[in-house]
C-alpha cells in the first residue's frame, strides 16, 4: 500500500531514508535544510513502511530579466550588474537562500549567469545559492 505522510525533519531516520534514495553527492542537505521555514510542505511517500519518495515545496525567488537587446553590450552588462546586485540584496533581506533563473535559447546569457554571477546550470534553469 502506498501512502503519503507528512515529513518531520526532527527524526534522523527519515533523513537517512530520504538520502538513501539519491547518490551520495546530493547528501549535502542537513536536517536544518529540510526543516527550513522556506520549505512550506514536506512529505514522504511510503510503500509498506519503506520510503520510496520525498517531496519538499520550497519558497524561492525567480529572476525575470528583460533587457533591450538593441542596447550596446556594455550598457546591458552594466544593467545586469545593477539588477543582480539589487536582486541578491532583496532576496537576502527576504530571508531566501537562492535565486532561480530560466533562459531560452540564449547561450551568451547562459555564460554570463554562470561565469559572472556564479549561477549553477541545470538544463535550461540556473540556481544561485546565497
Image (cartoon, grey):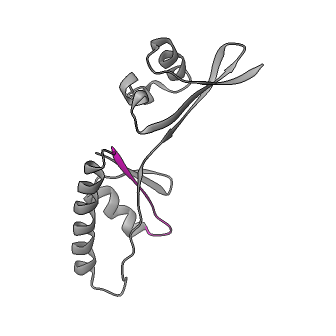
Task: Give the position of the C terminus as an image quadrant.
Answer: top left
Nearer the observer, 5 or 13:
5
- Estimate the x, y position of residue 96 in percent, counting from the top left: 34, 45
Residue at the limit of the structure toward the bottom, as seen here:
70
Q: Residue at x 65, y 15 (%)?
A: 50
Nearer the observer, 8 or 107:
8
Residue at the limit of the structure toward the right, as seen here:
1
Vertical order, 22 against 66 (above or below): above
Q: Is residue 25 visible?
A: no
- Estimate the x, y position of residue 117 in percent, counting from the top left: 27, 57
Q: Is 83 positioned to the left or the right of 4 in the image?
A: left
Magenta segment range? 96-106
Q: Residue at x 71, y 23 (%)?
A: 3
Q: Residue at x 49, y 57 (%)?
A: 124
Asked which quadrant contains residue 5, the reply is top right
Vertical order, 19 against 106 (above or below): above
Number of dots carrying numbers: 0
Q: Is residue 88 visible?
A: yes
Q: Is 116 positioned to the left or the right of 109 in the image?
A: left
Amino acid at each position: 500500500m502506498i501512502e503519503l505522510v507528512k515529513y518531520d525533519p526532527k527524526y534522523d531516520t527519515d533523513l537517512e531514508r530520504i538520502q538513501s534514495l539519491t547518490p551520495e553527492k546530493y547528501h549535502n542537505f542537513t536536517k536544518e535544510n529540510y526543516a527550513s521555514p522556506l520549505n512550506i510542505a514536506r512529505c514522504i511517500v511510503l510503500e509498506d513502511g519503506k520510503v520510496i519518495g520525498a517531496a519538499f515545496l520550497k519558497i524561492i525567488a525567480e529572476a525575470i530579466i528583460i533587457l533591450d537587446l538593441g542596447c550596446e553590450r556594455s550598457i546591458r552588462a552594466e544593467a545586469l550588474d545593477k539588477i543582480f546586485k539589487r536582486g541578491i540584496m532583496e532576496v537576502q533581506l527576504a530571508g531566501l537562500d537562492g535565486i532561480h533563473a530560466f533562459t531560452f535559447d540564449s547561450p551568451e546569457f547562459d555564460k554570463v549567469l554562470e561565469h559572472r554571477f556564479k549561477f549553477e546550470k541545470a538544463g535550461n534553469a540556473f540556481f544561485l545559492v546565497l
